[in-house]
Image: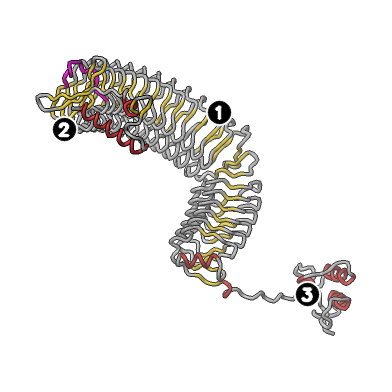
């Protein structure tokens, strides 16, 4: 029957291709039909067998062996050892795919291989007997067999394929024999009922995500034969309390124990040379760990959110500490960075709120942004005086020539700080969460303020930005809730994203003419902000720049971009030209020519004398004040004579009018 079905499919395919290519079905090629030539090598030999329970097996025969390639039926079945008069040696790919009524299956001793997806999505399958003859279990062979509770893998099997038991959520135990050398990627992924497993000495590698989401797994023994633990191998094994890694292991993959929240201790052997990115990410119960001398690098996110970690020893072999390596290790009180370390990644110790001291050795050549930010107990960052790239001034971290301020320790309890005159830039997050600081003096040498520079400085009440500064970074003053006023100089050209967001005490601000853009949410949630003056120079204002500033009025010039923005976002607008006072008349102080605040001194006489003699030309207020003899509007010798008489007290007041 199957032969007829496949022949019909081939015929349909031939007709379809004939239509697509506009070829006649009798198209000849060297005397043969084009289509007969195309299909002449397509040999199909398959048949069906129906057992006494009306279960239908589809199989194909090749080289004197039968392979099951399809099945229709259910319940408890025993696969026949012979089909079509030939021994059944393999269960083909997808053979029992989506047989949702199948509850148990016995595989005969004649079978040597179970193909890919062989029992995929057999959701009612509760038990299966695999004989000693089977040597390989294909990829996804039992994937989504959600009712399968236990399985014994015979000694003949050498490999467990990728995804082999993926999402077998009822599987509580499994025996892996000594013959198995590798456990494939995702092999037991999401086996949420699996409580324990013994990996035999024959296994050399544990694949990526092999036991990921095995949330009931409490313990596991890794044998000495294993050399590598794959990426995310035990990811989110939330019941795993301890694990011993043998001396044979050389690498711990990325995220290998990520989110193992019950893991309290782990021993890393001397054989391990690298700890992957996020290897122990969010192991919130891990209290201590010793890194052996063999390790040369600690990956990004390696111990991120290990909130119970109180101490860690980094050996002299380590040369780099990755980005976010100890991020939010809130119980970590101290750490010694060895002389071998050359680089400390960005955010490496960010939010290590219990860290009280740290010393940067002379070997360090690079420190990433925010490396020690938000360390609220850190009172000083000490740098070895022999370091050629960094220095500290009174515990404040700077680059070697002190032109870039990198980190002010947020645990420092001083209320005022004067930035050294050598500093030209304030680094990203340099003063983040320095909640004790009420005032900071920025010198004229500073040209840039980095992103998040004063983030969450909640006690900072006012700050003067000097004329040398050209840019204010994103989040620069974010959540400075006590900041009531700030002066932005006319050197600044842009105000970064969220630069003053959540400055809830800020009542008014004037944007200088130099500014051309105000970025996204720059003043978001400035709930006390009632007025802002935006000049004509501003041609770009980001979305939600004044989000939740409910009492705000924007002041600007008619037909300006500021007015367009205000109208579009339904923010009250006032034409500033209606409020601008005319230029006041200059105040005349007769005889006050050198503008030093004193009238009729010798310096004033000398300047007026030089002007009258044509040696200099007085201008502006000096020229106005020089007209001391008002009988003549011109400044000439009569004015000089009158000023001399006033200086000699021959006349009592100026101006002199005869």
Which label's residue is closer to the chain start, 1 or 2? Answer: 2
Depth check, mark 3 against mark 2: the one in front is: 2
Per the image, the residue denoted by label 1 is 339
Q: Is residue 242 visible?
A: no
Marker disc for residue 525: none
Per the image, the residue denoted by label 2 is 101
* Residue 134 drawn in magenta: no
Per the image, the residue denoted by label 3 is 624
Quarter in which the N terminus is drawn? top left
Query: Marks 2 and 1: in contact by CB < 8 Å?
Result: no
Which label's residue is closer to the chain start, 3 or 2? Answer: 2
Q: Which residues are magenta?
A: 79-92
The foreground one among 122 and 446 is 122
Q: Secondary structure at mark 2?
A: loop
Task: Tell me which residue sits at (33%, 18%) in the image.
Answer: 181
Query: Marks 3 and 1: in contact by CB < 8 Å?
Result: no
Which label's residue is closer to the chain start, 1 or 3? Answer: 1
In three-dimensional space, the C-alpha distance between marks 3 and 2, rounded to whole angstroms, equals 107 Å
Q: Residue pushed farthest bottom?
A: 658
Q: Secondary structure at mark 3?
A: helix
Q: Secondary structure at mark 1?
A: loop
Depth check, mark 1 against mark 2: the one in front is: 2
Q: Residue pushed farthest front?
A: 31
Residue 329, x across and y down, in percent: 42, 38
- Locate residue 584 relative to residue 151 in the image: left or right: right
């Amino acid at each position: 029957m199957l032969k007829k079905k496949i022949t019909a499919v081939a015929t349909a395919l031939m007709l379809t291709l004939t239509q697509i290519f506009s070829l006649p079905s009798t198209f000849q090629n060297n005397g043969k039909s084009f289509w007969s030539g195309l299909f002449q090598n397509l040999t199909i030999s398959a048949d069906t067998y129906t057992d006494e329970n009306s279960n239908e097996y589809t199989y194909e025969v090749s080289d004197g062996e039968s392979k099951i390639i399809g099945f229709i039926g259910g319940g408890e079945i025993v696969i026949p050892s012979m089909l079509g008069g030939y021994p059944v040696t393999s269960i083909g790919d997808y053979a029992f795919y989506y047989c949702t009524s199948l509850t148990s299956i016995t595989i005969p001793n004649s079978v040597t291989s179970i193909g890919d997806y062989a029992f995929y999505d057999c959701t009612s399958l509760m038990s299966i007997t695999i004989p000693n003859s089977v040597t390989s279990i294909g990829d996804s062979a039992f994937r989504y067999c959600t009712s399968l509770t236990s399985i014994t893998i015979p000694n003949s099997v050498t490999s467990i394929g990728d995804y082999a038991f993926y999402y077998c959520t009822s599987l509580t135990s499994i025996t892996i024999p000594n013959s198995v050398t590798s456990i494939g990627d995702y092999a037991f992924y999401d086996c949420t009922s699996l409580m324990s497993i013994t990996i035999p000495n024959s296994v050399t590698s544990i694949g990526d995500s092999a036991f990921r989401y095995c949330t009931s797994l409490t313990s596991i023994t890794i044998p000495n034969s294993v050399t590598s633990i794959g990426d995310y191998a035990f990811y989110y094994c939330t019941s795993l309390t301890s694990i011993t890694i043998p001396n044979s292991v050389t690498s711990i993959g990325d995220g290998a124990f990520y989110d193992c929240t019950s893991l309290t201790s782990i021993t890393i052997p001397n054989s391990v040379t690298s700890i992957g990115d996020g290897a122990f990410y969010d192991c919130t119960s891990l209290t201590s760990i010793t890194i052996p001398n063999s390790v040369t690098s600690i990956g990004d996110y390696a111990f991120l959110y290990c909130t119970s970690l109180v101490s860690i020893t980094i050996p002299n072999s380590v040369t780099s500490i990755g980005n976010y390596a100890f991020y939010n290790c809130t119980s970590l009180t101290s750490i010694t960075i060895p002389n071998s370390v050359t680089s400390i990644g960005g955010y490496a110790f960010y939010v290590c709120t219990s860290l009280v001291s740290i010393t940067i050795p002379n070997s360090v050549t690079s420190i990433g942004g925010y490396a020690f930010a938000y360390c609220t107990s850190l009172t000083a960052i000490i740098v070895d005086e022999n370091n050629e790239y960094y220095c500290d001034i009174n515990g404040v971290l700077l680059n070697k020539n002190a032109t870039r301020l990198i980190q002010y320790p947020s645990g420092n309890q001083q209320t005022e700080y004067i930035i050294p005159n050598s500093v030209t830039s304030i680094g990203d997050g340099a003063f983040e969460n320095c909640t004790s600081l009420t005032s900071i003096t920025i010198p004229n040498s500073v040209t840039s303020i980095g992103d998040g520079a004063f983030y969450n400085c909640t006690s900072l009440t006012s700050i003067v930005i000097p004329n040398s500064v050209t840019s204010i970074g994103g989040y620069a003053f974010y959540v400075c809730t006590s900041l009531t006023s700030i002066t932005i100089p006319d050197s600044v050209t842009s105000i970064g994203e969220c630069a003053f967001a959540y400055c809830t005490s800020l009542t008014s601000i004037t944007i200088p003419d130099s500014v051309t853009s105000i970025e996204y949410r720059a003043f978001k949630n400035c709930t006390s902000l009632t007025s802002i003056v935006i000049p004509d120079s501003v041609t770009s204002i980001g979305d939600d720049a004044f989000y939740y500033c409910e009492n705000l009025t924007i002041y600007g010039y008619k037909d300006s971009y500021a007015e367009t923005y205000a109208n579009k976002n339904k923010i009250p607008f006032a034409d500033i030209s209606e409020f601008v006072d005319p230029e006041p008349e200059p105040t005349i102080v007769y005889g006050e020519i050198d503008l030093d605040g004193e009238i009729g001194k010798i310096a004033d006489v000398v300047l007026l004398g030089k002007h009258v003699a044509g040696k200099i030309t007085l201008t502006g207020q000096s020229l106005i004040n020089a007209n001391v003899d008002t009988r003549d509007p011109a400044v000439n010798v009569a004015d000089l004579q009158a000023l001399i008489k006033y200086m000699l007290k021959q006349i009592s007041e100026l101006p002199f009018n005869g």
